[in-house]
Every structure is written in structure tokens, then in C-alpha cells.
Image (cartoon, helix red, strand yellow):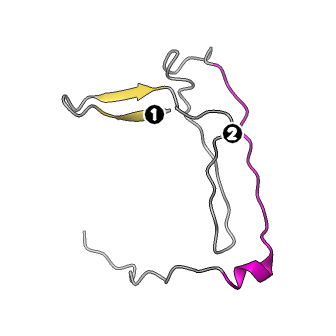
Amino acid sequence: MCTGFTKDTHQYFMKGSPVRPSDYIEFFAEADLIGGLSTCPGGDCSAKHSSNHAPCFPLLVEIFKPDTQGLDRFPYLPKSPYSGAHQD
């Protein structure tokens, strides 16, 4: 799903996802984590918004465990200096 606001009238819009077969997103976790995945509950908004008749497509999720020797050479980013304190 692709959403946003129009530049001229600032109106909210929805349109079908530009994703095509073989597209992917890759994440690298530097610590153990629990992942959750959610897709748009409105279905394929290019057809009809929030329709139970919208087509659904499979989504592949793969989790890889890298070679730990390779991680020794990984250029990790420095830890953020943010202390966790913030103002309201």
C-alpha cells in the first residue's frame, strides 16, 4: 500500500503498492530480537478500500544466521549518544 498527502491540496491518498515479485527488504539485527510483521488490514486499496474481496498474496519471510567470523569484520555503527532523557 502506498499512502501520502498530495503536494498541492494536502489531501490524504491511498494507492496500490508498487512492490513486484522478487522485491525485498533486508534488515540486519545487531542484537537478538523478536520481529512482527503486519500488512495493511485494508487489503489491496487499488481495488476497493477495506474490502474482503481484495486479493491476497503470499509473503515470504526468511531469517538467516550469519557466519560469526564475518561479523568480526562488520563495520558496526557507533552507539547513539542519546541518553533516553527528553523534554515534553
Classify 10 Å Cα crowding around label 2: few (below 14), some (14-19), many (20 and above): few
What mark, if any, has residue 2 been given in the picture? 1
Residue found 19% across the figure and 28% down from its top:
9
Q: Position of residue 25 (x, y in %)?
A: 61, 50
Residue found 64% across the figure and 68% down from its top:
29
Look at the numbered disc 1 and give the secondary structure of its residue. Answer: strand
Mark 2, residue position: 22
Q: Work out whether residue 75 or residue 14 is closer to the camera in this orientation and state it.
A: 75
Q: Work out whether residue 65 or residue 42 is closer to the camera in this orientation and state it.
A: 65
Which stretch did the figure color magenta?
A: 55-73
- Between the C-alphas of marks 1 and 2, the distance is 18 Å
Classify 10 Å Cα crowding around label 1: few (below 14), some (14-19), many (20 and above): few
Up-down: is 66 above or below 43?
below
Residue found 22% across the figure and 32% down from its top:
10
What amino acid is found at the position of numbered circle 2 in the picture?
Ser
Tell whether 3 sits left or right of 68: left
Q: Are marks 1 and 2 in contact (CB under 8 Å)?
A: no
Look at the numbered disc 2 and give the secondary structure of its residue. Answer: loop
SS assignment for the magenta stretch, majority: loop
